[in-house]
Image (cartoon, rainbow, N blue to C red):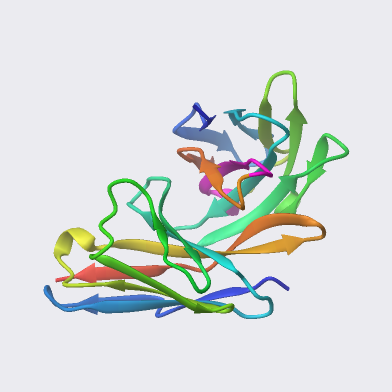
Amino acid sequence: GAVVSQHPSWVICKSGTSVKIECRSLDFQATTMFWYRQFPKQSLMLMATSNEGSKATYEQGVEKDKFLINHASLTLSTLTVTSAHPEDSSFYICSAGGTSGSYNEQFFGPGTRLTVL
Amino acid sequence: AQSVAQPEDQVNVAEGNPLTVKCTYSVSGNPYLFWYVQYPNRGLQFLLKYITGDNLVKGSYGFEAEFNKSQTSFHLKKPSALVSDSALYFCAVSNPDSNYQLIWGAGTKLIIKP
């Protein structure tokens, strides 16, 4: 149980285009999902916390208009990188908040590699 | 400020030897503690967690970790390293009152030499 998928697993796009990444909780409902960005050989950087049916909460320094997050259902959150530029190239990881036993924890997707040319 | 420290950027171990990857934390209350592993160009894989109970936690792939409250540590260990254990390891801590929020260590690259 507690499986999270991401689609696509990798994407290459031209500078100036927009890219949408989907994060799905496959066998549980997640009122809260998280989006992370990871640079090579570095730790995960939390970009935003997404709550179903409400606006996402962005971390300091993350551009809301650049990284659009939608969490329209209890099993799907999307991250859209708008007008992508080469500096947006990165590994994006989502997670979904769920319960393990009676404890809350995050369950992680496999990540999406974005390359902007 | 709440934080998680992985003091070693890289740990080198010979195959067959025991390994330890260190993690200390500074978080209020009674946190939950996690270890994840990441192979090149892959997502995170859950290894083990401590929530409550026995301080020694056993996880996937023969790994274990010991929660030490007095030292605020949660070091990852394995009795006999395999070359396939070579990867990036992350320690993470969450405050149960924080609605799933995780505080991440910087990661430790583990290299197992044959």
| Residue B33: image location, x then y, percent | 67, 41
**Is residue B41 found left or right of B91 in the rendered image?**
left
Residue, x 51% and y 34% (percent of image)? B12
Residue B30 visible in this rendered orientation of the protein: yes
Q: Is A86 placed above or below A61 here?
A: below
Can you name the residue that lies furthest to the top here?
B70
**Is residue B34 found left or right of A15 in the rendered image?**
right
| Residue A25: image location, x then y, percent | 59, 76
For the image, the number of numbered tags is: 0
Query: Residue A64, located in which quarter of the rendered image?
Result: bottom left
The answer to whether residue A90 is magenta is: no
In the foreground, A15 or B38: A15
Q: Quadrant of the N terminus of chain A?
A: bottom right
In the foreground, B88 or B111: B88
| Residue A98: image location, x then y, percent | 67, 64
| Residue B9: image location, x then y, percent | 44, 33
**Is residue B62 found left or right of A9 in the rendered image?**
right
Query: Residue B71, located in which quarter of the rendered image?
Result: top right
Can you name the residue that lies furthest to the front here?
A54
Q: Quadrant of the C terminus of chain A?
A: bottom left
Query: Residue A12, located in which quarter of the rendered image?
Result: bottom left
Magenta highlight range = B83-97
In the foreground, B57 or A95: A95
Residue, x 58% and y 36% (percent of image)? B14
Residue B41 visible in this rendered orientation of the protein: no
In the foreground, B9 or A62: A62
